[in-house]
Structure formats: structure tokens, C-alpha cells
Image: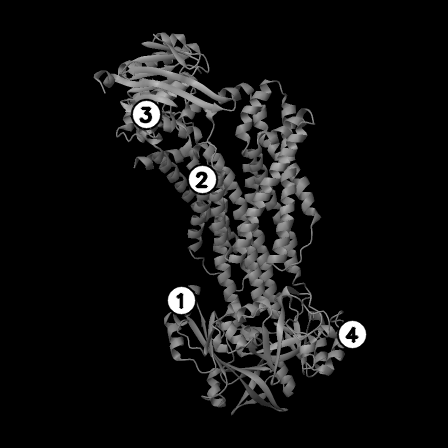
């Protein structure tokens, strides 16, 4: 691995994804190459069905590629099994989802605590409290997701993603379920926390405002990465 | 440690959020039913065994033709058990009218250890209960001895070298049952007077018995300690084999109780299956998110397993508590029915309850839980991926293995367990296939109808797997209700009717051939038995079993004490042309004509005990002559009918010419007892035996059993309602979004509610029809195969099953889904998004 590779958080080489559907074979991603550096903020844009979320899933090791190589934090993902990939994500990778994906039966604080405890982090409780404070939800720590607004739920999800201090955060349409004002607050929060933590940020979005504030923008069209601006 | 922390947090949150209520209710109910019956059966069986013990006046007896070594009594007393010794022998009593052969029993002051004696002071005076036998220096005698001797109570009787007064008339001995057909009148004396009579010497022919009683566990320990080294000439007796009439009733009560427990287990099992499936399905998103966050599979699985086991243990403990309270209620309810105080329950039912809860929960929930391991973390990003399609084989195997294990464990009868397992497997398979066919039919019909009917029927066909689960669940719930009706109304009534109010309470034995016709006339003319004819008075010939095929029968050849006893005693054989109503041929065929070849029909129980099979040639020594013939049929005998019955019956050709005495049974109501002296006067050679006490004892067992079974079936009823609730709940999640969309598209509330009513009513009718078929089939199997009762088709079952179920499920399902219909569609769609 070269010196440049050491700075690379995520890398895809000749990455392709094909699936077999009822109507025959379908190519979702076609031999794309991509590299994301430590601390970099990259936005992936594209129309619905262009393969953005599939690419995000492959880069995060949530899915296996049909062809090509994917590297995450210096590890080649296709050489690892599902548990190996989960262990690699554990503590290094954060996620923010469009539909928040908070566990409804846990309070805000318990949702933030969960990945910390799963990683076996000793000061999990203080880190969770710190993360909630960073997103301004200390007062709402004991509330359940159903008692929080959409924006608040997304802030809990962001606290959960940043609490283990990941090196990369993957976000799938983080403002997709929010109104414009709330969406802007969430964008500010995401980028502020990225700046503070130094983590790379890879996000899939339709939102041009959010994309504008990233270091790089990638456009997906019919499974191809057309622009790397 | 962190696994524990995460597990406890998730478990606490599961509980607070209500995710586990249904599963907990199903599990608590299952365990409560098992432990309530466990605790209660534990106490009742011990009490019944003790009451059975009344038949030997003890919990256990050692019997020998020679004096028993003192070590047995010493051992029992060292263990803290109560003991008594009795000696029974035949002798002659001298009265004013001459000698009379009697059966004498010398008892010590501790006798009887179980049950009480009854005596009266004169022929027409009321009887009173006594805790101990006669004092030294007096005799208690049967009234017919005084009549035969022409004496009155108080008369001096010569017994060996002593002359003792007959101070009281002995009317009841708890341990008389075994000697019910002994023809000689009975005399009881104090053991301390025995030496003075000079009747019993070292070589005297007598039966010596050591009676033992006490705590069941200690008695069992005593039995285990002495049993293996017991010499062949000493027999061990317990109450169970005492009288077939009582044993038969106790066995039926016990079978009914276990059946009630098993039905609760089966029905609650369906509720556990539905609830655990729903619980696991609701974990899908959480697992996907946790996998995304980097939780390794093995950690997640450990967390889920631990969560399941902890939950199972907590719910099962609550179930045990409820079961314990349940048996307390039952015991209080039945307190007056027991002549003895119920012993304390052991703790074993708690362990059984906990184990049952865990086996049931893990069996049903573990396979779908293991399938959670296959959830792709990608589902957190793409909900369209859905939950993984689990291996149906794994799920069925897990649930099947758990149910089979629990049935095997609970049935306590391997044959019954296998029948049940095969029956349940067959029922579930046919239920699933039938529901699939019916759902397809409903789908086909949906295309031909319009509006809400189309919507309702199409809803059934749209989710075939969900519909199968739902209708099967509802069907099992309805089946539980129908079985409850069937068992409660039909089977228990049949059982009670098997011992009708007019069941014979007197046996007339020693009837001479020339008295048969006049006696039949007397009984008919006096209205004691309207149907009495010669055929209801049965010939009785005594014979000793000497050979089975080529094997000579020696008592010592049999390890089983009962078989040994049977082989050493004479059988009461009979012959006849017609099979009695309370006899049923299990194997082989009954002879059809008076000149049918020589053959025997043997009762199944005794055939099994003695190792006699169909086709075997058996030989009896009758009047010094060996009479042999093949066994051509095995019979089940309903002993608790109290009719005259025989272990072995011969075809008329075989025993018809042998000298015989005759026997019959008759019901004499209290107000008709004045006929008894007339009967005794007209037929002096006939011995009249009053079995009213035994009849009352059997009737009590039956009545107690019915009450206990009805109580336990309340658990089944609750489980049935729960499974129906679970069945309705099963589809709510899927309906939420569907209703939101339909409402958004402009479907009115009324139309939606009507379509729901159509769907649930159709599901209820389908489930009810299936449940009715299975209820009738199960009822027939239970009645004919298990309880030996006559089964009758009950049209009410169909009315309740089909119409009742349609209305009940239709209303309950519509009401349960009503909140989904009235909630604003925007809210539903927003939540789904």
C-alpha cells in the first residue's frame, strides 16, 4: 500500500453490481473507480434508481460487489465475510439514514449508547451524553423516538453516528424526510461535526444545497460515475 | 458484561413498549396450566393413592403366608412410618346353632392405617365409624354370621379355645375389597386375643400382613429399599391394584386431567408460535441497523438468545406462580370432596413449568430468531429488501420438536403421546393444505364479486402465508372452544353416565343352579330389575390357570407381583353366548353361536399382565380336570360399570357342562332395602354383598375428576381466546399501510369496515368449519380410543363451530382493526415512510 493509500479511507476499483431479476439480468453499477480521502466530504448525486444507494452500501461493506474491489480503512472488503465486515465497521464507520432508523423501544440516550456498548467502549455513557450535548438534545435524552420531531430524531441519529468517533460517516439522504429549514439545520450539524471530528463524509443526496457544501460531488447516471468534480 | 447490559436494556424496553405482552401472556398461560395441573395432580394423585390405599388400609402392605420377619416393621418405623400387623385365616366359629366357617382377621390397635371401620350395635341400628378395631376380649362380626348362627349382637361365640362376645356388627372394612367375593362371613378380633384361641401355630395356613403408611416420599423410599431384596414368598401390595373398579375410575380421571393439560399446551403453543413470529419480525429493522453499526453476528445472536432465555425464565416463573395460585383455588374448591387432607405439593412442578416454558419458547422462537442472522445490513438503507425468507423446514422442525418433546413429557403414556403427536402433525398438515385450497377458492371468488366483497375476499387471497397462519390460529382457538364443549358436555357426561344413579350396588353370589330361575322371577316381580332374565345371572366356575401354551404357570415365574398373585389364585371363570354391553372386543372375534368351538376370551389388562396373547392356548384346572382352549379374543371391560364382569370367559361348549354357582348384581335403593330380608329368607344359600361404599367411592372419584377437568379446561379456554387474539393481531401490521393507501384513494370508512367484516367473517367460517371437523374427529378418537366411551355426533358443534365462529371472529376482527380504519391516512403513510 502506497503513502497515498494510507490517506485513502474508501476506495473502489472496477466496481460492478449485477442482479438477476424476473426480467433477466440487470446491471446497477458498471465498473466504476473511486477514492475517498480521510476527512473529505463527498456528495453522490443522481436520479432515483441511478445506483447511488447501492454504491453507498458497497462502499460501507453492507453488500457484496459482483466484480471489482472495495477497500475500507485499508482493508479489502471482498476478502472479508459478513462478520469481518461488521467488525471493520464497528467503531470506525457511522451511518445516518433517511428514515432515521432509531430503535423505537430505546430512548434517545439509549439509542446513542447502543453502538458504543456494542463496540465495548468503556466510557460509553459519558460519550453518549457528550454526543447528545453536541447535537443539542441533552434535555430530550430520555425521550423515545415517537416523542421527538423528525429533525430531533435525525439529530439523535447523527449523535449516534458520531459518538463512537468514526473515521468515515455514510449518510443516505439525511435531509430527505425533513422540511427545508430543519434540513438546513441538519446539514449544518453534519458538516460541523465532521469538521470537529475530522471524519470523512460520504453522502447520497438529492439536495443541491447539501451537495454544494461538500468537497466533491459525484454524479451517478445509469450505474456509471460520470463526473468526479 | 456488556452483552448482559445490552440484553437487559433491550429486554426492559421490549417490555415497556408492550412488544412482549402477547408472547408473555401465551407463555404464562402455558406454564400456569402445566404447573397448576402439576401441583394439583401431585396432590390429588397422592391423595387418590392414599384413598386407593384405603383398599389395603395402608399406603403399602407386605403379605406372606408365613410370619413376616420383624426387620421390615423395624425398618419402616426407623423411617418414621406408621405400621400395623394383621393376620387373616379361615376357621370355624361355634355358635348356638352349630359351627360356621368364617374368615377371621386379627388386628392390632394401630389398624387401620388408612380409612375407617364401620360398625353397628344391632341389625337395624345406624352404623358408626371407628378408628380402630375391636378391643381385647371382644369380636366384631358380619351380620350374616349372626343370622347363620341364629344369634344376636352380644352372643358368645367360640373361636378356637376362646369364647368371646360378638360386641358389634362389622359393616365396613376398608381393606375388605380384595376379599369381596370370599364366601365365608367375616370375624374381626384383637390380635392380643389370638394366642389364647390357639388357632395360629407355626404351620397354620394364614395370611400375614404388615401395613405401612406415612409421607408418600418416605413410603416410596421404604418400597425402594426393601423391594429389590424381597423374598419370593413376600408380596408387596399397594392401593393401585386393589380394585379394578376404582383403579379404572382413577385412571380415567388422570387421563382426563392430562388431556386437559395437553390441550392447553397445544392451543397455547399455537399462540406462542404466532406471538413469537410477530416478535421476531419486529426485530428485523433493529438487527439491520445494529449490523450496520458494526455489531458482529455472534454478539447479536448472544444478545437475542440471552434476551429470549431471560424473558422465558421470567414469564415461566410468573406462570408457575399463577399455576400455584390456580391449584390453591382448585384445592379450596374441592376441599370438601376429599376424605383426607391433601398433602403439600412437591416443588417438582416448578421445575417442570420452567422447563416447559423454555422448551416451548425456544422451540417456536429460536428458528425464526436464527434467521435474523441472515438479515442483510443493507435493509437499513433499502427497506424494499424485506425480511429474509426463513427456512420453513427449520421453523417446522423447531416447533414440531418442541411440541413433540412436551407431549411426550406431559402425556406420561408413550402410546398416547405418539398418537397425539401423529394426530397433531396430521391435523396441522391437513389444516394448512385445506386453508391454502380455501384461500385459493376465496381468491377465485373475489374475481366474481364486486365492491367490499371483492376487497374482503381478495384480502384473504393476497396473503396466503399470512392467511394460513391466521386461519390456522383462529381454527385452533375455535377448536379449543369446541373441544371444551365436546369434552365438557359429551365426554364427561358419558363418563358420569357410565356410572348411572341405578348402577348395581349389591352382588348376589353363590346362587345355586336351581335358584337361578326363581331368583330372576323374584327380582323381576319385586321390581328390583325390570330387565332381569336368566341371561343376566352369570355362571361362575372356579379354576386355576395352569398352562399358557406349553409353559406351565408357576407364580414364581412372574416378576410382577400382580401377575404372581393372579397365578397363585383361582380365577372366577364364566361362559356365555352374548357379549356384555360394557365389554368391547379389542382384538379377535367373539363367538356367535352356542355350538361355537371351545375358546376363551380374556380381558386385555390381565392378558398383558400374564403375557397371554391372541391365539395362545391357555389351560385351567377346573374340578381337578385340565380344560384347555385357544384365546380367540381380547376384551376391554368397563369395570366401573359395576356390572358383573369376568377376566376370562369361555364359549358355552367349553364350560357349559361344568358345575357352577351363579352370580348377578342388582341395584337396591335405600327405600327398597326392606326386600333384603325377604330375599335372604327365600334364597338362604345366596350371599348378598353390599358394594354401596365402593360405589360411592368410585362415584366420588368420577365427580371430583369432572370438576377438576372442567377447571383445568378454563386454561385451555383462555389459551383459545389468546390464540384467536394473536391470529387477529398477526395481520394488523400489514393492514396498517394497506388501509392508509385505500383511505387515501378514497375508500370510505364504511366500505373498509364492511370489507374487513367480510374478510374476518369468511376467515371465521373457514376456521370454524375446519375446527368442527377436527373437534368431531378428536372427540371420536378420545371417546372410542382413549376412554372407551360411546361417541355420538353432536350437531351443536357444527352450529357453534361454523356460525358462532363466523360471528365471533367477524365481530372481534372488525373491532380489533377498527382503530386502523378511523386513524387519519396521512399519519399512517407518514409513519410507513
* Residue under pointer 4: B525
* Circle 3 SS class: helix
Give the CA separation, mark 1 to mark 2. 43 Å
Tell me if mark 1 has few (under 14), some (14-19) or many (20+) residues whose alpha carbon lies within 10 angstroms of its own: some
Q: Nearer the viewer, mark 1 or mark 2?
A: 2
Q: Nearer the viewer, mark 4 or mark 2?
A: 2
Closer to us: B305 or B96? B305
**Horizontal arrangement in the rendering, residue B270 relative to residue A115 (left or right):** right
* Circle 2 SS class: helix
Give the CA separation, mark 4 to mark 3. 102 Å
Q: Position of residue A50 (x, y in %)?
A: 44, 14
- First in sequence, mark 4 or 2: give its number: 2
Point out the image quarter for the C terminus of chain A: top left
Q: Nearer the viewer, mark 4 or mark 3?
A: 3
Badge 4 sits on which subunit? B
* Residue under pointer 1: B221
- First in sequence, mark 1 or 2: give its number: 1
Using the rendered view, name the quadrant where residue B589 is placed.
Answer: bottom right
Are discs 3 and 1 located on one and the same chain?
no
- First in sequence, mark 1 or 4: give its number: 1
**Residue A77: mark in rendering:** 3
Residue sitting at 46 percent across and 25 percent down?
A: B385
* Residue under pointer 2: B367
Q: Nearer the viewer, mark 3 or mark 1?
A: 3
Q: Does the residue at mark 4 contact the one at mark 3 (Cβ under 8 Å)?
A: no
Tell me if mark 2 has few (under 14), some (14-19) or many (20+) residues whose alpha carbon lies within 10 angstroms of its own: many
Amino acid at each position: 500500500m502506497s503513502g497515498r493509500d494510507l490517506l485513502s479511507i474508501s476506495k473502489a476499483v472496477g466496481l460492478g453490481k449485477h442482479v438477476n431479476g424476473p426480467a433477466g439480468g440487470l446491471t446497477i453499477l458498471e465498473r466504476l473507480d473511486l477514492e475517498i480521502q480521510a476527512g473529505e466530504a463527498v456528495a453522490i448525486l443522481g436520479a432515483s434508481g441511478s445506483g447511488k444507494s447501492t454504491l453507498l452500501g458497497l462502499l460501507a461493506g453492507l453488500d457484496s460487489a459482483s466484480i471489482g474491489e472495495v477497500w475500507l480503512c485499508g482493508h479489502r472488503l471482498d476478502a472479508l465475510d459478513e462478520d469481518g465486515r461488521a467488525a471493520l465497521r464497528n467503531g470506525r464507520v457511522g451511518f445516518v439514514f433517511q428514515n432515521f432508523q432509531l430503535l423505537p423501544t430505546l430512548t434517545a440516550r439509549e439509542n446513542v449508547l447502543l453502538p458504543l456498548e456494542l463496540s465495548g467502549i468503556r466510557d460509553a455513557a459519558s460519550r453518549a451524553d457528550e454526543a447528545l450535548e453536541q447535537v443539542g438534545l441533552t434535555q430530550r435524552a430520555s425521550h423515545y423516538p415517537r416523542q421527538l420531531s423528525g429533525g430531533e430524531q435525525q439529530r439523535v441519529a447523527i449523535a449516534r453516528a458520531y459518538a463512537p468517533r468514526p473515521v468515515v460517516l455514510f449518510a443516505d439522504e439525511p435531509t430527505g424526510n425533513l422540511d427545508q429549514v430543519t434540513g438546513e439545520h441538519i446539514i449544518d450539524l453534519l458538516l460541523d461535526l465532521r469538521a470537529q471530528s475530522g471524519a470523512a463524509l460520504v453522502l447520497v443526496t438529492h439536495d443541491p444545497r447539501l451537495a454544494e457544501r461538500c468537497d466533491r460531488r459525484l454524479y451517478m447516471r445509469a450505474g456509471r460515475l460520470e463526473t468526479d468534480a | 458484561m456488556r452483552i448482559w447490559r445490552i440484553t437487559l436494556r433491550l429486554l426492559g424496553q421490549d417490555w415497556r413498549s408492550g412488544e412482549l405482552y402477547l408472547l408473555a401472556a401465551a407463555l404464562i398461560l402455558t406454564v400456569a396450566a402445566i404447573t397448576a395441573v402439576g401441583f394439583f395432580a401431585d396432590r390429588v394423585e397422592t391423595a387418590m393413592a392414599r384413598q386407593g390405599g384405603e383398599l389395603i388400609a395402608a399406603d403399602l402392605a407386605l403379605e406372606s403366608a408365613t410370619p413376616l420377619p420383624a426387620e421390615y416393621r423395624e425398618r419402616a418405623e426407623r423411617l418414621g412410618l406408621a405400621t400395623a400387623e394383621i393376620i387373616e385365616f379361615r376357621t370355624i366359629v361355634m355358635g348356638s346353632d352349630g359351627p360356621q366357617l368364617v374368615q377371621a382377621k386379627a388386628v392390632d390397635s394401630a389398624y387401620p392405617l388408612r380409612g375407617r371401620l364401620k360398625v353397628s350395635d344391632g341389625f337395624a341400628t345406624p352404623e358408626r365409624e371407628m378408628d380402630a378395631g375391636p378391643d381385647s376380649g371382644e369380636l366384631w362380626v358380619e351380620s350374616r354370621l349372626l343370622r347363620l348362627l341364629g344369634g344376636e349382637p352380644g352372643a358368645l361365640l367360640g373361636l378356637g379355645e376362646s369364647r368371646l362376645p360378638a360386641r358389634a356388627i362389622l359393616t365396613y372394612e376398608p381393606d375388605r375389597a380384595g376379599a369381596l367375593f370370599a364366601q365365608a362371613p367375616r370375624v374381626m378380633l384383637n390380635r392380643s386375643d389370638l394366642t389364647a384361641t390357639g388357632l395360629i401355630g407355626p404351620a397354620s395356613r394364614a395370611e400375614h400382613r404388615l401395613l405401612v403408611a406415612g409421607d408418600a416420599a418416605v413410603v416410596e423410599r421404604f418400597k425402594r429399599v426393601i423391594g429389590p431384596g424381597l423374598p419370593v414368598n413376600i408380596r408387596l401390595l399397594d392401593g393401585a391394584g386393589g380394585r379394578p373398579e376404582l383403579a379404572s375410575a382413577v385412571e380415567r380421571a388422570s387421563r382426563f386431567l392430562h388431556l386437559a393439560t395437553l390441550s392447553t399446551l397445544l392451543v397455547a403453543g399455537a399462540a406462542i408460535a404466532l406471538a413469537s413470529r410477530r416478535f421476531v419480525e419486529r426485530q428485523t429493522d433493529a438487527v439491520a441497523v445494529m449490523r450496520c453499526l458494526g455489531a458482529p453476528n455472534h454478539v447479536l445472536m448472544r444478545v437475542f438468545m440471552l434476551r429470549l432465555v431471560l424473558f422465558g425464565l421470567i414469564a415461566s416463573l410468573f406462570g408457575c406462580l399463577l399455576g400455584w395460585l390456580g391449584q390453591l383455588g382448585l384445592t379450596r374448591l374441592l376441599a370438601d370432596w376429599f376424605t383426607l387432607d391433601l398433602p403439600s405439593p412437591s416443588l417438582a412442578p416448578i421445575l417442570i413449568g420452567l422447563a416447559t416454558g423454555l422448551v416451548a419458547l425456544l422451540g417456536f422462537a429460536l428458528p425464526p430468531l436464527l434467521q435474523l442472522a441472515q438479515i442483510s445490513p443493507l435493509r437499513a438503507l433499502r427497506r424494499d429488501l424485506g425480511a429474509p425468507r426463513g427456512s420453513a423446514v427449520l421453523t417446522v422442525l423447531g416447533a414440531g420438536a418442541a411440541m413433540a418433546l412436551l407431549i411426550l413429557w406431559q402425556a406420561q403414556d408413550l402410546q398416547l403421546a405418539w398418537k397425539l403427536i401423529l394426530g397433531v402433525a396430521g391435523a396441522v398438515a391437513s389444516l394448512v393444505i385445506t386453508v391454502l385450497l380455501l384461500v385459493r377458492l376465496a381468491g377465485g371468488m373475489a374475481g366474481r364479486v364486486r365492491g367490499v366483497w371483492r376487497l374482503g375476499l381478495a384480502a384473504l387471497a393476497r396473503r396466503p402465508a399470512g392467511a394460513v397462519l391466521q386461519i390456522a390460529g383462529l381454527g385452533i382457538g375455535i377448536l379449543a372452544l369446541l373441544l371444551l364443549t365436546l369434552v365438557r358436555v359429551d365426554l364427561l357426561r358419558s363418563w358420569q353416565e357410565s356410572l348411572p344413579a341405578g348402577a348395581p350396588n349389591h352382588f348376589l353370589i353363590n346362587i345355586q343352579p336351581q335358584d337361578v330361575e326363581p331368583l330372576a322371577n323374584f327380582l323381576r316381580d319385586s321390581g328390583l330389575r325390570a330387565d332381569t332374565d336368566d341371561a343376566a345371572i352369570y355362571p361362575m366356575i372356579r379354576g386355576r390357570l395352569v398352562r399358557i401354551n406349553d409353559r406351565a404357570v408357576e407364580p414364581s415365574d412372574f416378576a410382577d407381583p400382580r401377575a404372581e398373585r393372579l397365578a397363585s389364585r383361582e380365577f372366577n371363570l364364566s361362559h356365555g353366548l352374548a357379549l356384555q354391553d360394557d365389554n368391547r372386543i379389542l382384538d379377535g372375534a367373539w363367538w356367535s353361536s352356542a355350538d361355537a368351538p371351545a375358546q376363551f376370551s380374556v380381558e386385555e389388562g390381565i392378558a398383558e399382565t400374564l403375557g397371554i396373547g391372541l391365539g395362545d392356548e391357555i389351560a385351567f384346572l377346573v374340578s381337578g380336570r385340565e380344560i384347555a382352549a385357544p384365546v380367540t379374543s381380547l376384551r376391554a371391560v368397563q369395570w366401573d360399570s359395576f356390572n358383573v364382569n369376568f377376566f376370562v370367559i369361555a364359549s358355552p361348549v367349553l364350560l357349559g357342562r361344568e358345575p357352577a354357582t351363579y352370580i348377578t348384581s342388582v341395584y337396591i335403593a335405600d327405600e327398597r332395602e326392606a326386600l333384603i330380608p325377604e330375599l335372604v329368607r327365600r334364597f338362604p344359600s345366596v350371599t348378598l354383598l353390599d358394594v354401596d361404599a365402593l360405589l360411592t367411592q368410585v362415584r366420588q372419584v368420577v365427580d371430583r375428576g369432572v370438576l377438576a377437568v372442567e377447571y383445568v379446561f378454563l386454561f385451555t379456554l383462555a389459551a383459545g381466546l389468546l390464540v384467536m387474539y394473536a391470529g387477529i393481531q398477526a395481520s394488523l401490521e400489514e393492514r396498517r399501510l394497506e388501509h392508509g393507501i385505500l383511505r387515501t384513494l378514497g375508500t370510505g370508512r364504511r366500505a373498509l369496515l364492511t370489507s374487513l367484516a367480510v374478510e374476518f367473517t369468511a376467515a371465521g367460517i373457514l376456521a370454524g368449519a375446519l375446527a368442527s371437523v377436527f373437534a368431531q374427529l378428536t372427540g371420536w378418537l378420545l371417546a372410542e380410543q382413549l376412554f372407551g366411551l360411546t361417541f355420538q355426533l353432536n350437531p351443536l358443534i357444527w352450529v357453534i363451530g361454523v356460525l358462532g365462529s363466523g360471528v365471533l371472529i367477524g365481530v372481534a376482527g372488525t373491532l380489533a382493526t377498527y382503530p386502523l380504519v378511523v386513524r387519519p391516512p396521512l399519519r399512517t403513510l407518514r409513519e410507513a415512510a
